[in-house]
Amino acid sequence: MRHTGLKPLLRVAGALTDPTRVRVLMVLREGELCVCELCDILRVTQSTLSTHLRVLRDAGMVDSRREGKWAYYRLSASTPEVLEFLQARFRDSLEGFAPLRADRTRWQKRLALRDAGGCCVGSLPGNVCSKPSKR
């Protein structure tokens, strides 16, 4: 028996099985962010973030656009509804998850660096995303 009609549901469910992807979604609830902003806020490397964004994009939960050298990500149209349900159902778990609180603080600081509403600095020196690779 084939369950092809379940693929979208299973992709979304699978996308929500990783704490970093949940963090990405919760940060994007606040609005569109570029990859370097997401790296700095979440304290992950660009390659790690790219993997998580691909899963979220394949699940139809995030959309992207390019503007110059920046790639911006935002929640897809149906995702806020899913996140509202999850936040209502799992409020205590989400509020007790310390990384989400830290993400929120870093989000506020990072957005203060924007120029004309867009990213203008790339990854900040000293953050995970800007460290040179060890080769």
Image (cartoon, rainbow, N blue to C red):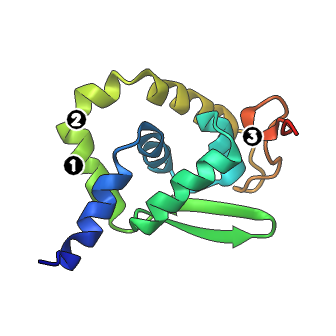
- Callout 1 secondary element: helix
Q: Is residue 97 above or below residue 112?
A: above
Q: Residue at the left extreme?
A: 1
Q: Which callout, 1 or 2, points at the residue further toward the start of the chain?
A: 1
Q: Quadrant of residue 77?
A: bottom left
Percent of width and height locating residue 114: 74, 47
Q: Are marks 1 and 3 in contact (CB under 8 Å)?
A: no
- Callout 2 secondary element: loop
At horizontal 33% and vertical 26% (from top left) the residue drawn is 95
In front of the other: 74 or 12 = 12
Q: Which callout, 2 or 3, points at the residue further toward the start of the chain?
A: 2
Percent of width and height locating residue 34: 66, 55
Q: CA distance from mark 1 to mark 2?
A: 8 Å
Residue 6 horizontal side relative to residue 95, left or right: left
Q: CA distance from mark 1 to mark 3?
A: 32 Å
User: Which residue in the structure is indicated by mark 2?
Assistant: 90
Determine which of the numbered discs, if any, sits on residue 85 in the image: 1
At horizontal 26% and vertical 62% (from top left) the residue drawn is 10
Q: Quadrant of residue 56?
A: bottom left
Q: Nearer the viewer, mark 2 or mark 3?
A: 3
Amino acid type of disc 2?
Phe
Amino acid type of disc 3?
Cys
Amino acid type of disc 1?
Phe
Determine which of the numbered discs, if any, sits on residue 129 in the image: 3
Q: Which callout, 1 or 3, points at the residue further toward the start of the chain?
A: 1
Q: CA distance from mark 2 to mark 3?
A: 30 Å
Q: Residues within 10 Å of mark 3 (few under 14, many from 20)?
A: many
Q: Are marks 1 and 2 in contact (CB under 8 Å)?
A: no
Quadrant containing the N terminus is: bottom left
Q: Residue at the front extreme?
A: 1
Quadrant containing the C terminus is: top right
